Amino acid sequence: MRPIVVGCNHKTAPLELREKLTLDEPRARQAMDALRRDYDGCEVVVLSTCNRSEFYVARPTHARPREDDMVRFLAGLCSAAPDDLVEHLYVHDGRNAVDHLFRVASSLDSMVVGETQILNQVKQALAAAEAGGAVGKALKSVFQWALHVAKEVHTETQISSGQVSVGSVAVRFARQIFSRFDDKTVLMIGAGEMGKLTLQHVLETGPKRVLVANRTPERAQRVAPRYQAEPAGFDRLSEFLARADVVISSTGASEPVLTVPLLEPVLPARSYRPLVIIDIAVPRDVEPAVAELDNVYLYNIDDLQTVVDASVEDRQAQLLDVDRIIAEHVDEFVAWRDSRSVGPVLDALRGHIDEILAAEADWAKPKLTGHPERDAEILDQLLHRVIGKLMHRPSRTLRQKATDGSVEVYIETLRRLFDLPEIEEVGDEAPKD
């Protein structure tokens, strides 16, 4: 089974496209089911986070889905033309797919290098595929190895030290806008894992006041006391917006929670004080038109890149160590996987030869007479029959491959397998008129 990964991330695709390809658990399950229905025998794992959507597929080497199949499939998911989508996608197969997954799980391919949330997201993606019966030995082994590599990376290097999360970057970005926070009110919309991580960094700024709004008020009430914040449900969102100086939003909503109709009536109550909104959700929590409102300054997750770039520069030494660890593990995994695939193939070859020998022995035995000369002729015929049957399929395949330009690979493989001598090229001269 050969692995292939097709997807897009914050480096290759604009936010608008990433939103369309963001899959929650039900949509991811539907996508896995659809692929396995269309391509019998393939394995699928879907990894969809705020900054990437990736499909990991394992299928026999010459089977489908192939790259163009996956491009069409993803285009269907986001209602786009394949030609418009393909420029924003990356495709890795075989060893390169393994290397990519190890880098993703180790957070080397994350927007915020060193963040640890991706490790749990990879784990959850594998668990979801297992629960849906979409993953077999091929993908399960490479994902489990990737999780092991990621844990070693975070243990053996300092890649995760300091402030390494999208939430921490959002707060650092806000600190570039405001020189002080002791007179500011910060509103956190969303009390999930990202919201809680962000609140930790908000507290470090020493804000005057912290507010937490959540679609489920009970969750806000549980989370807020841990961060010295005031809780509320969305029924009080307008009230909180009127008080806030900085809003950081990270919910799992499929539609914007901050819209122009919601904010317009709030602005007069604020006396049109400047309002900074940092939207770190994908899909976005804030509709883009909000940026057109007076004294409202809207930033999305892609606007944080300047802070991210500075963070990466601070981690160059750690990145070299991570590269080394990943490269070593890719070599180990590929060698392990290939060694496991050799045994069954050799067993199948031996079984094939045994079947031919047994069938030809059944042909020869009744013909043996006990006379040396006659029996020698029969044994000679037996050997020729066995050789002919062993050579039949390889000979037919080589002749077929001679017409599609790939015969040299097969010839070289045969030569190496059976230690055959180099064969001089024939027919090099061009035909004469």
Image (tube, grey):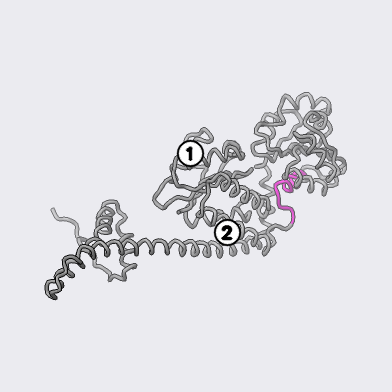
Q: Main secondary structure of the magenta part?
A: helix
Q: Which amino acid type is shown beneath numbered disc 2? A: Trp
Q: Which amino acid type is shown beneath numbered disc 1? A: Phe
How far from the left and from the top, in percent, is residue 413?
34, 63
Q: Quarter of the image holding residue 399?
A: bottom left
Specify which label sits upstream in the sequence, 1 or 2.
1
Of 250 and 222, nearer the camera is: 222
> Residue drawn at (46%, 40%), measured in percent from left and top?
37
How far from the left and from the top, in percent, is residue 332?
53, 65
Q: Nearer the viewer, mark 1 or mark 2?
A: 2
Residue 389 seen in the figure: yes
Residue under label 1, please give it: 73
How far from the left and from the top, in percent, is residue 112?
67, 50
Of 256 and 46, nearer the camera is: 46
Q: Quarter of the image holding residue 298?
A: top right
Of 78 and 424, nearer the camera is: 78
Of 10 and 148, nearer the camera is: 148
Q: Which mark is residue 145?
A: 2
The span shown in magenta is 162-174
> Residue drawn at (75%, 32%), measured in percent from left and top?
296
